Amino acid sequence: MTEILVVGEAANEKLQPVVGELLAAARSLSASTGEEVSVAIPSAGGDEEISSEAIALGADRVYMIRDPLLAEPSLDAQVAAIETACRQIEPSTVLVGRTPAGRDLGPRLAFRLGVGMAQDCVQIELDDATQRVAATRPVYGGNAVARMIFKDANPQIVVLRAKVYEPLEPDSSRKGDVVAIQANLDASVIQTRLVETVNREAEGVRMEDAPIVIGGGRGLGGPEPFEMLEDLAKLLGGAVGASRAVCDAGWLDHSYQIGLTGKTITPGLYITVGISGASQHMAGCSGAKSLVAINRDSDANIFKEAAFGVVGDWKNVLPSFIETVRELVKS
Amino acid sequence: MPLKIVVCVKQVMDPETPVSAFKIDRDAKRVIPAPGIPPVVNGFDENAVEAALRLKDGGDAEITVVSAGDNFVMDVMKKPLSMGADRMVLVQDEAVEDLDGFATAYTLAEAIKKLGEYDLILCGRQASDWDNALVPLGIAEMLGLPCITMAQKIEVTDGGVIVERAMSDGYEVVEASLPALVTVSNELGEPRYPTLRGIMTASRKTPDIWSASDLGLDRARLAPSLELADLFVPVSDRQCEFIEGEDEADAGRQLALRLREEKLI
Ligand SMILES: Cc1cc2nc3c(=O)[nH]c(=O)nc-3n(C[C@H](O)[C@H](O)[C@H](O)COP(=O)(O)OP(=O)(O)OC[C@H]3O[C@@H](n4cnc5c(N)ncnc54)[C@H](O)[C@@H]3O)c2cc1C
Ligand SMILES: Nc1ncnc2c1ncn2[C@@H]1O[C@H](COP(=O)(O)O)[C@@H](O)[C@H]1O
């Protein structure tokens, strides 16, 4: 019996949030294939709790891949560890999260195993006709959608976009077994070395977690108007984000960028000002529940996705909007 | 000895093509090129060319640009030469047009082997057609090279490379020994504009053209590894409610009231 294997990315002895999403996707696929769902966690040891967490989130089995080389954060070591596990387990399907590590790990694993893979997928299912995995993904910056079906080589490797599948409610009564795999990696697998990590701590609410995000675009004309957006964000307990045009121009740091090659946000409300709504921008905010657009061009693409829109110059629209919000929030 | 740099560059449909001009032939499962909008060099690949040129500005380097495809628009493809690259190799063949990431990586890895010596291979972080970010990792795996993705800064030291990798909230510093493959992101900074002199120099250069058989490519390895079952333009069923007022300022006020009514703020 083959199984569906989820790559259990972990940091600081905790599973990454994306692993819960992968498990949910794996469970929905296994409902069609009848296969078991397992998780492979590369680890240097000493983190037993992590396996209970994986089981509670839907795993039938947890493979703890052990190797001293996994003590240091090294993608090279993780790729080699997962490769070793795949050769032993021979899963039908491998699910990887599209995280900074996963989007490199998936392709590297596929090239090593000599099989195909699908990058940045938003949906997976069993194709009725072929009984193979069908993966759906946005392409051309989100302008188009492709549905692809795996040919007969296993494993079928899918890199799944984050924040698309809802994790299952953790159930601590679920049972599963834990299996150790000794990877016996050779030190030569490590070809790159992490020297340093430099984090820019965002002030206030993190954009990824914010209930409300205010996004500014090239239409704002420069960095100064972003202070108004900051005011508005503070009033609403939200965070400020931006289009790539703004970050490339140096008005804001790249950590503010929302979109295909920036951050993915899923707020209840996303208010955009002077953003045209290019597909690559929309790719990062399609999970927003309500979208509001202020833009002076009534044909701007952003209005095709917006729930509420004002056609006008932000210089006229925004001050009265912020004032009214201030009054409403006070009352 | 000059630092030998290879930059992989792809010709793609202009990603700024207006949504209204973006059309798909669903039966053929391919995009119909928008009339009057020429293709471009993939944006991140221009960043990679820029990265190579900065290394050349700071020392002795020789930059070879490599691309695989068939319907090249020469004026478009010559841009890296106008920017200052030394040489261009086009693997131009019907057999290598529209390949998937696996077959493209195989083709480019073979082309790079044929080039011979290299210290550093630079690629864009992803091609703006399928946004795959797949090919560079494949080239690195096939050539057995260290691979560092998402560079915003590249420094070459004696026998090694130190890369700042753009992360969503900052960056990582990663090092490897040469030869190595590095992919470049737009955080590196704007690619330079070709100078008039650069354009003149480029106009006198002719790319080397290699065919699939020049590289001895195994046709079986050019077949796609997944079957494209469907390609379509997603339809949005959202309807925008336009908020109006006596003037634009009033519309701003009305918008706030409407959002309150919907309990969104
Ligand atoms: C591979 C790739 C990846 C990309 N990734 C991303 C990404 O992650 N995120 C991203 O955002 N982009 C990304 N882009 C870029 C994207 O294609 C667009 O170029 C970018 O989103 C445009 O930003 P913008 O909407 O701010 O600017 P523009 O498209 O220039 O739009 C400005 C808007 O402001 C309006 N405006 C102007 N003046 C005013 C005024 N006074 N009042 C009101 N409105 C006004 C205009 O009508 C216009 O609609 C990517 C592109 C590529 C090729
Ligand atoms: N046909 C090609 N010719 C040359 N370089 C390519 C080609 N396809 C991809 N690349 C390189 O690989 C990078 C990533 O492409 P992709 O994996 O398709 O997203 C691009 O930015 C290019 O540097």
Image: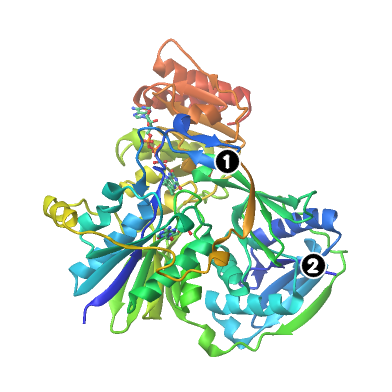
Task: Report whether A173 appears left or right of A6.
Answer: right
Q: Is residue A175 above or below residue B193?
A: below
Question: Of residues B247 and B127, which is closer to you in this image?
Answer: B127
- Percent x, y of residue A254: 39, 53
Image quarter where ligand 2 lies: bottom left
Instruction: Sort mark 1 into few (<14), some (14-19) or many (20+) by Cα contacts within 10 Å.
Output: few
Mark 2 touches mark 1? (CB < 8 Å): no
Q: Chain of mark 1?
A: B
- Percent x, y of residue A268: 61, 38
Question: Of residues A174 and B93, which is closer to you in this image?
Answer: B93
SS for callout 2: strand
For residue A136, the mark is none
For residue A3, the mark is 2
Which residue ends up furthest to the front in the rendered image? B213
The quadrant in which the N terminus of chain B is found is bottom left
Alpha carbons under labels 2 and 1: distance apart: 35 Å
Q: Is residue B75 above or below residue B177?
A: above
- Percent x, y of residue A250: 31, 49
Q: Is residue B212 visible?
A: yes
Q: Chain of mark 2?
A: A
The quadrant in which the C terminus of chain B is found is top right
For residue B28, the mark is 1
Q: Residue type at mark 1?
A: Ala
Is the C-beta of the residue carrying label 2 under 8 Å from the nearest atom of ligand 2? Answer: no
Which residue ends up furthest to the left in the rendered image? B197
- Percent x, y of residue B205: 19, 59
Q: Are marks 2 and 1 on the same chain?
A: no
Q: Is residue B8 above or below residue A162?
A: below
Question: Of residues A221 and B36, which is closer to you in this image?
Answer: B36
SS for callout 1: loop
